[in-house]
Amino acid sequence: MLRGRRAEREVVERLLARARDGRSGVLVVRGEAGIGKTALLEHARDAAAGYRVERATGVESEMEFAFAGLHQLCAPLLDRLGALPEPQQAALGVALGRRAGDPPDRFLVGLATLGLLAEAAEERPLLCLVDDAQWLDAASVQILAFVARRVEAEQVVLVFGLRDPDPDRDGAEVLAGLPELRLNGLGEADARALLAAAVRAPLDERVRDRIIAEARGNPLALLELPRGAEPAASAELAGGFALPAAPAELAGGFALPDALGVPRRVEESFERRSGSLPADTQLLLLVAAAEPVGDPALLWRAAEHLGIGTEAALPAEAAGLLEIGTRVRFSHPLVRSAVYRAAGPWDRRRAHGALAEATDPRADPDRRAWHRAQAVLGTDETVAAELERSAGRARSRGGLAAAAAFLERAVALTPEPAERARRALAAAHAKHQAGTPDAASELLMVAEAGPLDALRRARVELLRAQIAFVLTRGSDVPGMLLDAAKTLGPLDAALARETYLDAMEASIHAGPLGQGRGVLEVADAARDAPAPSTPPRPVDLLLDGLVTRFTQGYEASVPALRLALESLGGHDPRADDDSRRWLWLACHIAAMLWDDEAVYVLAGRHVRLARQAGALGTLPGALNTLAAVLVPTGAFAHAAELIAEEAAITQATGGAPLPNARLMLAAWRGRRAETSELYAAAVQEATARGEGMAVTLAQYELAVLHNGLGNYPAALAAAADASGFDLLAHSSLALPELVEAAVRAGEPARAAAALERLSPRARASGTPWALGLEARSRALVSTGPAAEELYREAIERLGDCRMVAHLARARLVYGEWLRREGRRKDARAQLRTAHEQLSGMGAEGFAERAARELRATGEQPRKRTVQPADALTAHELLIARLVAGGATSKEAGAQLFLSPRTIDAHLRNIFRKLGLTSRRQLRNLRLP
């Protein structure tokens, strides 16, 4: 039984009880080594009556093998793999090495794992115990953290045991934010009881007090310190134990606790105990410590290679350090680390060499290569080449961190300088892709130290710039990318053009906060880029169009940029999925051109491609962009659904919520407090990152808010800031806001100046959206019959595009003009329609402005009719829309990265709120 852990046991038991009632649960049990995490996990297993129990245990020497921990947990469940959708089957199969295929997105593997656990829990609840999670490989801990953040109603419980983080290892911190239970030391009474139960012989009171004090309530220390204490050479105390040496004893016989801390003292105790065993037993323990799988057959094959017989295990088992049965198990992970730490380099190499010889090169080539690498003193090209092949296999399964680790070790073993430099560059790329830019920078230094040809040296420059962008987003990044592009020009024309476009994008991101080479300088330099391929790729068309935009002006760039958008939008068969990395940039270009159809198609395509690939790394950004596109179309509810989906995914993947679409929606809804809070946070974060483009977007949205609320001086200031720096979309989109705010604020000169910038751009664009906004803006600065004609033109043109919110605003300003002209009847018609449209979509600020004007004409505005769907959250509305469209629970779950059972639980809430009983009724309900 667990002593002194009543409250902790109750937490675990409540978690299991809730899962029996249909609710999943997660718990991360944290604490120092020996504090009782494993014991609490064992209590969870014992208390899980009626549960299926699966487990995985992290092993420090297993951390370099991609998906090793996930394989432990999922292997017994793979008979249910066929129940998953084919893309999920493929992703998990490739990750676990069961089938060949393209490297899967790690979050698609996460969704497949979630589905597999949910399928296993269909018969009875499932308890997953993951001990020593700090030693899971990076891929496994990312997947399990994703699953832990997505379980809701599957009757799945995940309990992690996580050692307090090592300052040098923070991989397990991806579990941060999950429900947590911290284990502290036992109270003194429980500690004394545990010590008394463990040590039957009488203890001198001072020895007992000293052990209690130094153990600090750590159960393993209470059990191990008496066993590890050295017998006193003289003046023995009762029980045969001597007080450990202490530098300065205090009154009562106590000393200051060792600065090493309790776990390290326990580990030293294990070192002393293992070090007292026969030499063959010590070597056998070392082989077991170096072998993470726990396979007894492999252990005995390696032992035979070293000339060690089975009898060598007996002293280790008698000492309670090791158990060899169907698996090889140490009594505690600290025993493994103590044995390995205490061994000398020569013995470690012998142990790994024996394990390499004992490992089947066909069944497990990667572990064999890793053991061979650890057995090498100096360099060895044969082993380095093996490691490079292992890196390729890891990469093909989506294990970027594992591939990087194999390559990094290969670099150290490579004798020939040129080959070492090549591998160092490959390792740096892998580290960068795995999200460890600091390690990538160190490997770049190794690459640079060796002989590199001109192309690889240029690639070093490029990677250094890419790492700098990740680490600092500094103003020098565009210049670094530009220098790399120039170097690549004569060596790799295609890569050089991509790098020029990267430099353009980085300078656009920096915007007014950039202090290095700005977008105009980058565009001027990019005119010297190598000629594009024939036929040109989408990236080539984008680069040429943007160079024209910033060297010859907006109007001159429209044809080239439109051609690029058509290519990326799928109208050109040359566009392929590899081009999706540029879709974000393309969406901003389409918005700059006021091309509502292109921006809608491109944003939708970005989301669709990300969904199909299961690319949860890029899907949140794509959803955020599409939501921002939908806001001015008046589809506020749909935009809110996408924002909710984006938030759920970023929360599940450990990312930060993206502010852009949230801020835009709050501004158009006229929510002053929410917009102000989001604006302040967005500007602060963007300024810290040096992203002036994000600041400009926030200023544009602030202008929309204040125009809706009728606070025109504030709108004028925000719109002036947003349009002051000539970026892509926002500087153009802000111009109509600037015209309206300036007119209403009584500054006609500023309105005329903004219109002078807006008109040639709108006419060059030629889209109904552009021409409608230009007509609306010109009407605002005009008078008499000319103004009315322009208002009517604006309504007609905006009626021909998707931008319903701008159409409603055109009716609003036309109605305001008609009322001031004394034409109250005509004004009522426009204002009534504007109010209905604006209130219907949820543009509360603009709707109230229309309501005030309507009341001024003598008519009371109608209140918006409450709809049944108003009771649904944005997330529930999204699920309702999918199911109403005919999606099954499995299909809806696959799109939203939830299990079918969780979808069913949400549907029960939706049916209750809407008073429905069937999916057929839901299909017949009109949703906003």
Image (tube, helix red, strand yellow):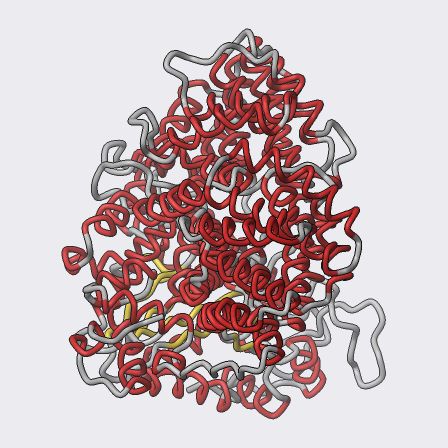
Left/right of residue 157 with respect to residue 468 in the rendered view: left
Return the residue nearer the eye: 631 or 328. 631
Residue 567 appears in view: yes
Q: Residue at x 51, y 50 (%)?
A: 794
Please identify the quarter of the rendering in which residue 847 is found. bottom right
Q: Residue at x 22, y 83 (%)?
A: 50
How many labels were placed on the picture?
A: 0
**Quadrant the N terminus occupies:** bottom left
The vertical placement of 923 against 538, above or below, is below
Return the residue nearer the eye: 912 or 855. 855
Residue 336 appears in view: no
The vertical placement of 518 against 496, above or below, is below
Please identify the quarter of the rendering in which residue 746 is found. bottom right
Horizontal and vertical percent position of residue 690: 72, 43
Return the residue nearer the eye: 808 or 79. 808
Q: Residue at x 37, y 36 (%)?
A: 569
Return the residue nearer the eye: 615 or 621. 621
Horizontal and vertical percent position of residue 86: 19, 50
Q: Residue at x 38, y 67 (%)?
A: 150
**Quadrant the C terminus occupies:** bottom left
Horizontal and vertical percent position of residue 924: 20, 74
The vertical placement of 871 against 455, above or below, is below
Horizontal and vertical percent position of residue 472: 69, 41
The vertical placement of 818 against 412, above or below, is below
